[in-house]
Amino acid sequence: MALPNFLIAGMAKCGTSSLAQYLQQHPEVFISKQKEPRYFSSQCMPFPINGPKGDKLEDWYVKSFEAYKALFEGVTENAIGEASADTIYFHKCTIPIIKEKLGDPKIIIILRNPAKRAFSAYQHLVRDERESGSFQEALSKEAYYIENNYELIHHFRAVSHYYEHVQAFMEAFTEVKVILNEDLQRKPKEVLKSVIEFLGVSADFDFETDLKFNESGIPKNRLLHDNLQQQNSPIRKLIRPIARVILPTEEKRRRMVTWLSGRNLSKMEFSDEEYKSLLKEFEPEVIKLEELLNRDLSIWKV
């Protein structure tokens, strides 16, 4: 029975979607088609999820181990994994379950400038019409969101406090690889080569890294954005026969949807004052993380 031997465990809005999409290009790597099954976190959190569109979010969670196993049925690739960006955040609960169900899988963690990560989460919520106020208003409501069981993406500051979560995974699992989103953006092929070497598959592979996935921002055209996000939307159903002729493979059609989605987004303004204020708040923890990872993280400091 095939089960994951590696997990992309998070963090949210740090590039887990892009990393997963890149890795699944490799012929020896399998990543579940459902990018975020969230099985392990589903065992930890109460339902229902509150907040805007919270009633629709619960369907994303694979709650039973039988359903989770079905995601990997018949898989024969050497490296088998999945990417659920909230796995690491709920580490106190998820680690024991991972060890019980999967043993000692390889763990990949991707981190990002903590202030930019928090702002990206806010932009994501604005994009999906789940947040309408300013960034500061959203930050001021964070405690309320956490207390009232809003989805993880509403935990703006909390998710950006990485140290405790990373330390817990490094102590619990034998092989843990931590990469930075900034490195993935700046030198993607070099980073991906190091990741597939970590996974123990052939490093002789040329990845396509021109696209970014699950980007945040404000849709320039709301109707286009909503239709691109829904697999069976009226517009996608209408153009599907034509798309299958022009773009004969599922991969090419997926790449086109991703490209159109990205082109339809405009970035929001993150003021220098807000940015520096948040960085200052995170700096003591960034220093601890530097020691833990034995890595210079001055790019995350004021």
Image (cartoon, rainbow, N blue to C red):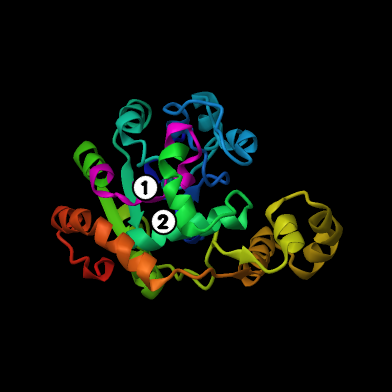
| Number of the label disc, if any, that sits on residue 78 | none
Q: Is residue 109 magenta?
A: no
Q: Is residue 160 magenta?
A: yes
Of residue 42 and residue 240, the one placed in the foreground of this image is 42
User: Is 275 positioned to the left or the right of 32 in the image?
Assistant: left
Mark 1 neighbour density, 10 Å: few (under 14) some (14–19) many (20 or more): many
Which stretch is magenta?
146-165
Q: Residue at x 48, y 53 (%)?
A: 137
Q: What's under tag 2, amino acid-wise?
A: Ala
Of residue 133 and residue 146, the one placed in the foreground of this image is 133
CB under 8 Å between discs 2 and 1: yes
Q: Quadrant of the C terminus?
A: bottom left
Q: What's under tag 1, amino acid-wise?
A: Val
**Which residue carries the number 2 mark?**
118
The quadrant in which residue 256 appears is bottom right
Helix, strand or loop at label 1? It is helix
